[in-house]
Image: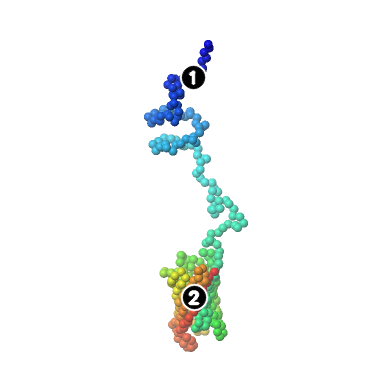
Amino acid sequence: MKIYKVGLPFIGMSSLMLLTSPLANAAEMPIMDHSSMDMSGMDHSSMDMSDMDHSSMDMSGMDHSSMDMSGMDHSSMDMSGMQGGEPPADARSPDYSNGVPYGQYGKPMMMGSMPLWGVSVDDLGYQFDDDQINFEATGWYGTDSNRVRLRTEGSAQTKDDKEIDSLSSLAYWKPLSIFWNGEAGVAYDTENDKSAVMAGIVGTAPYFIETDARAYLYTDGQLRLDLGAEYEWRLDQHWVVIPEVGLTAFSKDDHDNDITKGFNEMETEVRLTYETFSRQLAPYIGVSYETALGKARGQRRQHNESVDSSSLTAGVKFWF
């Protein structure tokens, strides 16, 4: 009978018992406490862990708060491939296009820099007692910081010679502050048949009073000053009461055109306006009152003209 010896490496009895016992199952192995083990003298520099797969390791339960890494040297670590650091030169373009072309429509513009236009008819009404049509309209083109404005105001008689008296101006408009805008340009007065240089300021005074002041220097040296104020008393979302007043003054007498030095005339009106849903169209009814001031009262009496007059008015205001 032959006896064969199996060539096995030497295994201690205790290790053999461990391999063959049920405790070899990892799930049944007792939890070992490594807290008392001193591994400070172990040299891990020669260990090659490049082939190890750490993707399945769960370290969510590990507590790193007690780890002291103050002695670690990170100067030799290469993190150039990590996200962060200095952005590339073309990371964000000043116009926020990120290098993407705008296509056939070209570069977009900010709303405040885009040239626009508008037309506002502040008054187109009929005075029943005076039998005339009053008008005031403004058209503009430009941006929020620079505009060209064409403005006209006056009245047209509906009987007799049907005369039209108007004061029109073409001006450059620019904001001066948050609530005030400046105007400068040229004007023409059909009543006096004279041209003038115009400068003015328009804006909102305290308590939301719409205010305008314009000066006209005529070619003959006459200086005219127009002052106006208007307030919107809103009753609800559609009904609005609008009182307004206007004053006219001149720097010297002009008997050919019935003009006296100082304040010549005051015009007032109160309107009850109904703004439609779009607020672009607002019909109104109201009462107007005009009176001569200063020496102009005596001059009108000499020409058998009325010093004071009042009238019912009806009309519309709109913009687009």
Q: Residue 181 in the image: x percent, y percent?
A: 48, 68
Q: Quadrant location of the C terminus?
A: bottom right
Q: Residue at x 52, y 62 (%)?
A: 112
User: Which residue, as the protein is rendered here, is positioned at the far top?
Assistant: 1
Residue 291 occupies quadrant: bottom left
Which of 290 and 294 lies nearest the eye of the viewer?
290
Dot 1 or dot 2: first in sequence order is 1
Assign a secondary structure to mark 1.
Answer: loop
Q: Residue 131 in the image: x percent, y percent?
A: 52, 83
Amino acid on which disc 1 is placed: Pro
Q: Residue 147 in the image: x percent, y percent?
A: 53, 67
Q: Residue at x 52, y 76 (%)?
A: 124
Left/right of residue 233 with respect to residue 185 in the rendered view: left
Amino acid on which disc 2 is placed: Tyr
Category of crowding for the residue at label 2, using alpha-carbon neighbours closer than 10 angstroms: few (below 14), some (14–19), many (at least 20) = many
Q: Residue at x 55, y 51 (%)?
A: 98
User: Which residue, as the protein is rendered here, is positioned at the far left?
Assistant: 36
Instruction: Quickly name the residue at label 1.
Output: 9
Residue 314 shows in the view: yes
Category of crowding for the residue at label 1, using alpha-carbon neighbours closer than 10 angstroms: few (below 14), some (14–19), many (at least 20) = few
Instruction: Quickly name the residue at label 2.
Output: 284
Residue 231 occupies quadrant: bottom left
